[in-house]
Image (spheres, helix red, strand yellow):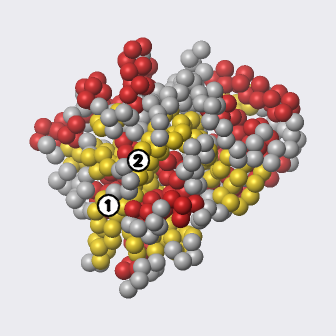
Amino acid sequence: MSKKYIIGIDEGTTSVRVSLYDIKRKGIVSHVKKQINDTFPYPGWVEQDAEEIWKKTKQCLDEILSQINPEEVYGIGITNQRETVIAWDSKTGKPIYNAIVWQCRRTADFCNCQLKGDISNTIHQKTGLIPDAYFSATKIKWILENVPKAKTLLNSGRLNVGTIECFLAYKLTNGQSFVTDITNASRTMLYNLKTEKWDAGLLDLFKIDEKILPKIVDNDTLIGKYNYKNIEIPIAGMIGDQQSSLFGQMCIKKGDLKNTYGTGSFMLLNIGDEIIYSKHRLLTTVAWKIKGKTTYALEGSAFNCGSSIEWLKDIGLIKDAHECDTLAESIDSSNGVYFVPAFTGLGAPYWDGNARALICGITRGTTKAHITRATLDSIAFSVKDIYDVLYTDTDIKTGTIRVDGGVSKSDFTMQYQSNLLGKNIQRSKEIENTSLGAIYMCGLTLGVWKNLTDLIKLYKPAKIYKPKKSKEIMLEKYSGWKEAISRALTKR
């Protein structure tokens, strides 16, 4: 029987989404999505039920497979929220604690107090990362020191610790595969960019035994097989969500640039096959490793983007995200209101884990329209913060910026972003490029597409936004944002 489908699992921060890609129709033809719930045990802490993540992933996958003949599926690709950590019993496959989400700030004080000076510089040179609670290493350290069962399992040799894709691969293969891909490994603060291995010095620094960590594999690796009603379906092409988005957008040439507007906002610049270290607190990360060749990216991450809009819903200011554009367009400006959405601290280029959200410039005349517009403005301002420093780190020039993610559906925000950057913004026809990247990687691994040239032909742009406002007007608005940021910072 001929095969015609590839399935992409995208386990994101707010939901798990499983998509069905039709090879002949060259697009995603169906998807199933389920929300993942957050818990906030203490201020700044963010957790998710690891069992819920697994069960909902399996439910979505099985529902997609029930819609088709599973024998027609080439394989399954996996992409995931990065940095989030799960610890589990290797014998039972049961998590021993909630997943500690990338947004969690519980280890911020440790990072601020212990990872300074020469240690900070060493971490940056080895990993390309800025020491921060954002990354996996201190989350793993916290589990080892604070979860009693972790110590017991460690002593018995039954403790497994990994990021989301590692956990899902383990569960999908019924415990046969304990691996992580190179892109997710590069986000742990334990991976050495130059040796492409777990770093012994960093493992010692964080008191982590390498035996509890998975094997690191390339992105074009056959991970194992998922047994669905006695039909074995290959699992191949694991890749972290932002790298997957970069790949799904077909930003495969040096100088290609994309921004994803999801729960957070993530800008990645393809910097080719040479490591470039940022002088302005951006991150150097692995974009992917295919056919033995590693490609790198510079990345800037703003922790809160779509989550800001979710907050507006949570407090009853709006009913749904679609209302944002209507409210924002109902007024000429935010009337001096600025919103800094530092719910879980500030990411690049500030890296202030103790910063907290604020709204300033409120008067008696301020309405929910002003606050909503200030929220959408803040998303564009956060991207400009990253964009401006990106090009002081490299002489690589880019043209149009490719965008995706839920917030990219906001015409108001994308036009404002274009005005602010003075650049064309190109929205992909497929908003969920994160899923598409994993699908492409799976297909490339399994020989559905012969090479990257075949994949480039599949890219479909949907809409281009061109600058419409003068540079002077936009810079004046941006100066107000910088003043608001200065009020939120605790590191001055």
Q: Residue furthest left?
A: 156
User: Can the viewer see residue 426 in this picture?
Assistant: yes
The CA distance from mark 1 to mark 2 is 17 Å
| Label 1 SS | strand
What residue would you read off at disc 1? 222
Which residue is depicted at the point 26% across and 46% down? 215
| Label 2 SS | strand
Q: Residue furthest bottom?
A: 1
Q: Position of residue 420 (x, y in %)?
A: 77, 37
Marked residue nearer the N-terminal end (1 or 2): 1
Position of 247 with respect to 173 (left or right) is right
Position of 411 with respect to 189 (left or right) is right
Decide which of 422, 56 is in the foreground and name it: 422
Marks 1/2 in contact by CB < 8 Å: the verdict is no
Q: Position of residue 397 (x, y in %)?
A: 66, 38
Which residue is depicted at the point 86% across and 48% down? 330
Which quarter of the rendering shows the C terminus? top right
Which quarter of the rendering shows the N terminus? bottom left
What residue would you read off at disc 2? 293
Q: Position of residue 392 (x, y in %)?
A: 63, 27
Picture layout, residue 210 above or below residue 70? above
